[in-house]
Image (tube, rainbow, N blue to C red):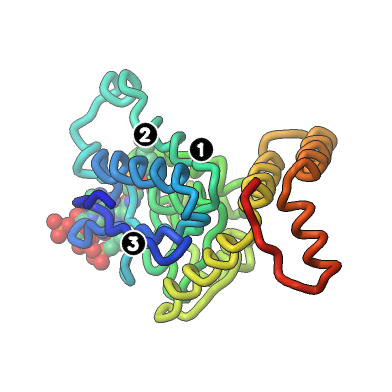
Amino acid sequence: MSSYETLLVEQRSAVTLVTLNRPKALNALNAQVLNELLDVMRAFDADPSQGCAVLTGSEKAFAAGADIKEMQAQGFADMYGHDFFAGWDSFTRTRKPIIAAVAGYALGGGCEVAMMCDFILAADTAKFGQPEIKLGVSPGMGGSQRLTRAVGKAKAMEMCLTGRMMDAAEAERAGLVSRIVPAAELVEEAVQTAATIAAMPPLAVKANKEMVNVAFETTLAQGVQFERRLFHALFGTEDQKEGMTAFVEKRPGNWTGR
Ligand code: CO8
């Protein structure tokens, strides 16, 4: 595996563990982080031995935002002209699941990247916020949209307008995170959860991810139709035959990914 300056990447059996590693900048997300992360995610998606990824940061910060020092001197022509941050759209096109394991600060772009992952496991120390307004800007990597869909308008609007942070307990109540775990167990718990997913039939994993995400893009009727068609399609796989036969024979399934 290639080595990176801003990331630590480790394969634990079928799980790719990616740790943001710019401790001096609280894992602020700059162009290098984006490029390295996209490289890792492309390799992860293409590697049949890997089934699920975990993206995490440090105990203090998942990521304290986009790199303010990188953006400080930029003008409209630079940002709009280069469609700054459009590259993050590629991250969301990863077809295998990615779990965000968040301890400490997930602010601005940090919160936005956590929300680009498929779900968030939070340490009890996690703090989420969209404080960009205090810098004279706004969320720019999907925060105003994904946070609103996750927690509803009232909380999202308050957080974007005041920059107030949400702690882990509030984030769980609001539906931003799937579960809270003690900080010391966060990465192990995330890796175990990822291993559970990686042990599932791979085509069904992709299909389940795709259909849940479609819920954000369509009407209910279109979404239900999309789900049913993919469900039908899974009956064309070997793993459906194996999964249902294994159930009837009371034994674990043996997946081929076909
Ligand atoms: N960018 C660059 N450097 C950062 C960032 C950041 N987002 N956050 C922290 N750092 C750096 C600090 O500058 C400091 O570096 P140095 O030691 O060289 O001064 C180091 O990390 C440690 O930070 P602090 O000393 O501030 O640590 P504290 O524990 O005192 O405070 C906080 C921690 C509360 C997290 C504080 O660092 C903070 O408020 N950070 C900024 C949070 C923020 O505003 N995030 C939003 C950034 S903007 C953004 O994400 C926009 C995304 C969309 C843009 C889209 C454009 C198209």
Q: Nearer the viewer, mark 3 or mark 2?
A: 3
Q: Which residue is mark 3?
A: 10
Looking at the rendered structure, which numbered label has been put on residue 1?
Answer: none
The reply to whether the residue tagged 1 has its Cβ within 8 angstroms of ligand 1 is: no
Which residue is drawn at the image coordinates 56% and 45% (left, top)?
Answer: 146
Residue depicted at 41% across the width and 37% down the height: 88
Task: Give the x, y percent position of residue 30.
Answer: 26, 43
Residue 227 placement (x, y as % from top left): 78, 41
Q: Secondary structure at mark 2?
A: loop
For the point 54% across and 52% down, which residue is it?
97
Examine the rendered structure and indicate whether residue 246 appears above or below residue 49: below
| Residue indicated by mark 2 | 85
Along the line of sight, which residue is nearer the eye, 50 or 26? 50
Give the amino acid type for the residue marked by disc 3 in the picture: Glu
Residue 93 is labelled as 1
Front-lying residue, 48 or 56: 48
- At mark 3, the secondary structure is strand
Looking at the image, residue 232 sits to the left or right of residue 159; the answer is right
Q: Are marks 1 and 2 in contact (CB under 8 Å)?
A: no
Quadrant in the picture for residue 137:
top left
- Picture coordinates of residue 124 (x, y %)? 47, 76
Q: Is mark 2 within 8 Å of ligand 1?
A: yes
Mark earlier in primary sequence (1, 2): 2
Whichever of labels 1 and 3 marks the residue nearer the N terminus, that label is 3
Q: Quadrant of residue 172?
A: bottom right
